[in-house]
C-alpha cells in the first residue's frame, strides 16, 4: 500500500512549499522577530534545566552550597520561566499570524484570479471543485504553514539546548540516548507516506462530495420530479463513505506514531536507569538528565512531524497553484485606452470564432449604428449567444475584428468596454440580497430614488412594494422566491439603472402568461429605447421593428435585412416565421 517517495516527488513537493513560503516574504519582519523569540524560548528552557540542577544539588546535598547561594539560584527559576513563557507566546503568535495571513493573501489571489479567468474557464470547471479549492485547500494550508513556521522557529533551539545539557552532564550517556531518537523517527516516516497518500485522495474525494451536493442543491427540482432522491442519497453516501474510510486510514497512521515512540522511549528509560545505578550518578544529575530527555521529546516529535505537515499541505498547495496558473485568456493589451464618448458605430469585421477546433462563427460581418436594434435569429446552436458574448469580450475573436467607432475593442480597457454594455440574459442571476441591492448591482452609487425609478420603468415597482419588506426584502439565491417574469423585470431594472448605451438582450425562452409577457415586453421596450441593441430573439413577434435581422445557421449569416425584406425574400426567415406563427397562434378556419 505504501508508495515509495521518489527523489523528484520530494523535490517537487519542496518546490511547491517554497512557492508557498514565497507568500510569507512580505512578512519577513515578523518571521525574524518570531525566530528571535524562538531563540529566547530555547535558551531559557536550557537555563531552567541548568538552574534546576544547581538548585537540586543545593537542596539535596546542602553541604555543597550556602543557603544564600541556593536561594539566588532558585530565584533564577521563575526568571527563566518568565522568559520562556514570553518567548513561547510571541514566537507562536507572530508566526501563526504570518501563516494565517499567507492564507488570507492566497485566498484573495485565488478569488481575484477567478474573477480574471474568462467565461470559457467556467464552462469547463466543476463548481464544487472550485469551491473546495478556495475553502478546503486553503484551510489545510493554514494549519500547515503556521504550525511549520512556529515549530521551525522554536523547536530547533530547544533541541540544541537540550543536547548541550545532555552532553555536559554525561557525554557517554548522551550518545546512547541520542541513538534512540532516530529509531523513533522510523515509524513516523513510514506512517508519513500513508498520510500523504490518503490526504491527497481525501481532497479529491471531498471535492466530489461538494460537487454532488452542489448538483443536488441547484437541481433540486429535477431530482424531485424524477423521484431520484434514493439514488442521490445512495450516490452521496458512497462518496461520503470513501471520505470516512480515508479519514480512518489517516487516523490509524497518525494514532500509531505516538504509542510506538512512547514504547521505545520507555525501553530507553529503563536502560538509562540501570546505567545511572552503575555509574553512581547523583540525584540532581540524574533528574536533570531525565528532564532534558523529556524536554527533548517535544522538539523531536514536532520537528519530525514537520515533513508530514509539508506533505499534507503541498498536495493542497499544488491544487491551488494549478488554479492560479490557469492562463487568463482574455487579457488587456498594454497601452489599452479607455472607451470614452459616444458609441456611434459597432462593426463586426470578418469575425470567426471557435471554442475548440471547429469554428462556431464564420466570417461574420455587419455594422450597427447608434440606436439601432440588431436581432439575431436562428435555430438552437446556430451561434447567437456566442456572437453576442464576443462584444463584452467574454471570449476573444479567433479571426477578424470587432470595432467600436472604428477601433478594435481589444485596444480598449476591458473595464471601460464592459461599462458601456448592459446585459439582460435568460439566466437572470440574482444574488442573495435585497431587491434594492439586486437592482443596484453594478451601480453601487445609485440612491434609493434612482433604484425605485428604474424599478418603476421596468414594471417591477408594484410587485416589489407588495413584498413583506418592499425594496429591503431579501429575494433569495437565484431569485427562487420570484416568478420568471418578476425575475426578468428585476434584471431589466438593473440594466435600466446601469444605463449603458449598448444592450445585449437574450430574451427568455420560458413561457410567460400573457399578462406577465405584456409587462416584460413593455419593460423591454422602455429599456431598448435610445440604445444600440443586440437581441437574441426566440419569439419573432418581438423583433419585427428591428433595423437589422441576421439569420444565423451553423455560424454563418445566411440572410440579412428587415422583417419586411426578409418576408418578401421567402427564405429561411420566412420559414421560421411561418413555423412560429402557426404554432403560436393556431389559425381558425
Ligand atoms: P445559440 O445561442 O444560437 O443556441 P450558441 O452560441 O450557444 O448557439 O452555440 C453555438 C455552438 O457553439 C453550438 O454548437 C454549441 O454547442 C457550441 N458552444 C457553445 N458554448 C460553448 C462552450 N462554452 N464550449 C464549447 N462549445 C460551445
Image (cartoon, rainbow, N blue to C red):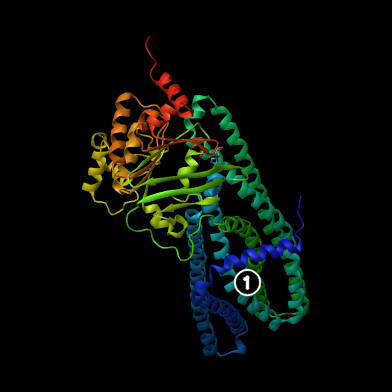
Q: Quadrant of residue 267?
A: bottom right
Instruction: Give the side of residue 263 with respect to residue 58, left or right.
Output: right
Q: Where is residue 70 in the image (x, y as percent from the top left)?
A: 55, 86
Q: Does the residue labelled 1 lie within 8 Å of ligand 1?
A: no
How many numbered marks does the figure carry? 1
Q: In which quarter of the image is the C terminus?
A: top left
Nearest the eye: 313 or 479: 479
Look at the picture and state if 94 lies above or below 524: below
Q: Position of residue 418 (x, y in %)?
A: 40, 52
Element class at badge 1: helix
Look at the picture and state if 585 lies above or below 162: above
Q: Residue at x 53, y 79 (%)?
A: 36
Residue 1: tell me if it is visible: yes
Nearest the eye: 564 or 336: 564
Look at the picture and state if 9 lies above or below 277: above
Residue placed farthest to the left in the image?
449
* Mark 1 burial class by Cα count in 10 Å: few <14, some 14-19, many 20+: some
Q: Which residue is drawn at 49% across and 71% down?
A: 94
Nearest the eye: 398 or 86: 398
Residue 434: tell me if it is visible: no
Residue placed farthest to the top in the image?
589
Nearest the eye: 188 or 110: 110
Q: Position of residue 168 (x, y in %)?
A: 69, 84
Q: Name the residue under label 1.
A: 295
Q: Where is residue 275 in the image (x, y as percent from the top left)?
A: 77, 74
Q: Which residue is drawn at 52% across and 89% down?
A: 68
Amino acid at each position: 500500500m505504501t508508495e515509495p517517495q521518489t527523489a523528484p516527488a520530494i523535490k517537487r513537493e519542496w518546490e511547491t512549499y517554497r512557492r508557498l513560503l514565497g507568500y510569507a516574504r512580505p512578512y519577513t519582519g515578523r518571521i525574524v522577530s518570531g525566530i528571535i523569540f524562538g531563540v529566547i524560548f530555547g535558551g531559557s528552557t536550557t537555563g531552567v534545566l541548568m538552574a534546576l540542577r544547581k538548585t537540586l544539588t543545593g537542596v539535596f546535598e546542602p553541604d555543597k552550597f550556602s543557603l544564600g547561594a541556593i536561594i539566588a539560584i532558585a530565584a533564577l527559576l521563575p526568571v527563566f520561566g518568565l522568559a520562556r513563557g514570553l518567548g513561547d507566546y510571541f514566537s507562536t503568535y507572530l508566526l501563526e499570524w504570518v501563516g494565517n495571513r499567507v492564507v488570507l493573501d492566497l485566498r484573495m489571489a485565488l478569488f481575484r484570479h477567478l474573477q480574471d479567468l474568462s467565461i470559457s474557464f467556467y464552462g469547463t470547471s466543476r463548481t464544487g471543485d472550485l469551491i473546495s479549492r478556495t475553502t478546503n485547500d486553503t484551510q489545510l494550508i493554514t494549519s500547515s504553514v503556521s504550525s511549520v513556521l512556529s515549530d521551525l522557529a522554536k523547536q530547533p533551539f530547544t533541541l540544541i539546548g537540550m543536547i548541550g545539557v545532555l552532553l555536559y552532564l554525561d557525554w557517554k550517556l548522551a550518545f546512547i540516548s541520542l541513538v534512540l531518537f532516530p529509531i523513533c523517527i522510523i515509524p513516523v516516516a513510514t506512517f508519513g507516506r500513508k498520510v500523504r497518500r490518503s490526504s491527497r485522495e481525501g481532497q479529491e474525494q471531498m471535492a466530489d462530495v461538494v460537487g454532488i451536493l452542489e448538483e443536488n442543491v441547484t437541481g433540486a427540482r429535477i431530482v424531485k420530479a424524477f423521484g431520484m432522491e434514493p439514488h442521490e442519497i445512495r450516490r452521496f453516501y458512497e462518496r461520503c463513505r470513501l471520505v470516512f474510510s480515508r479519514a480512518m486510514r489517516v487516523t490509524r497512521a497518525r494514532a500509531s506514531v505516538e504509542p510506538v515512540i512512547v514504547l521505545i522511549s520507555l525501553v530507553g528509560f529503563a536502560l538509562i536507569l540501570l546505567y545511572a545505578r552503575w555509574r553512581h550518578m547523583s540525584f540532581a544529575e540524574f533528574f536533570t538528565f531525565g528532564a532534558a530527555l523529556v524536554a527533548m521529546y517535544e522538539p523531536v516529535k514536532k520537528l519530525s512531524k514537520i515533513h508530514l505537515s509539508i506533505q499534507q499541505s503541498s498536495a493542497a498547495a499544488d491544487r491551488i497553484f494549478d488554479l492560479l496558473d490557469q492562463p487568463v485568456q482574455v487579457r488587456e493589451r498594454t497601452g489599452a485606452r479607455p472607451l470614452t464618448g459616444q458609441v456611434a458605430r459597432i462593426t463586426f469585421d470578418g469575425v470567426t470564432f471557435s471554442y475548440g477546433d471547429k469554428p462556431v462563427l464564420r466570417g461574420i460581418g455587419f455594422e450597427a449604428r447608434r440606436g439601432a436594434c440588431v436581432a439575431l435569429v436562428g435555430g438552437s446552436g446556430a451561434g447567437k449567444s456566442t456572437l453576442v458574448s464576443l462584444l463584452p469580450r467574454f471570449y476573444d475573436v479567433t479571426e477578424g475584428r470587432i470595432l467600436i467607432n472604428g477601433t478594435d475593442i481589444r485596444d480598449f480597457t476591458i473595464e471601460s468596454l464592459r461599462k458601456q454594455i448592459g446585459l439582460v440574459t435568460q439566466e437572470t442571476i440574482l444574488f442573495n440580497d435585497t431587491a434594492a441591492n439586486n437592482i443596484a448591482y453594478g451601480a453601487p452609487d445609485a440612491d434609493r430614488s434612482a433604484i425605485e425609478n428604474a424599478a418603476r420603468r421596468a414594471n417591477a415597482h408594484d410587485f416589489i412594494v407588495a413584498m413583506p419588506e418592499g425594496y429591503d426584502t431579501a429575494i433569495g439565491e437565484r431569485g427562487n422566491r420570484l416568478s420568471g417574469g418578476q425575475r426578468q423585470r428585476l434584471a431589466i431594472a438593473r440594466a435600466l439603472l446601469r444605463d449603458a448605451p449598448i444592450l445585449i438582450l437574450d430574451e427568455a425562452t420560458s413561457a410567460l402568461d400573457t399578462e406577465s409577457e405584456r409587462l416584460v415586453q413593455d419593460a423591454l421596450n422602455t429599456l431598448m429605447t435610445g440604445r444600440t441593441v443586440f437581441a437574441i430573439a426566440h419569439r419573432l413577434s418581438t423583433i419585427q421593428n428591428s433595423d437589422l435581422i441576421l439569420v444565423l445557421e451553423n455560424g454563418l449569416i445566411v440572410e440579412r435585412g428587415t422583417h419586411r425584406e426578409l418576408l418578401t425574400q421567402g427564405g429561411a426567415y420566412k420559414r421560421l416565421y411561418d413555423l412560429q406563427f402557426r404554432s403560436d397562434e393556431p389559425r381558425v378556419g
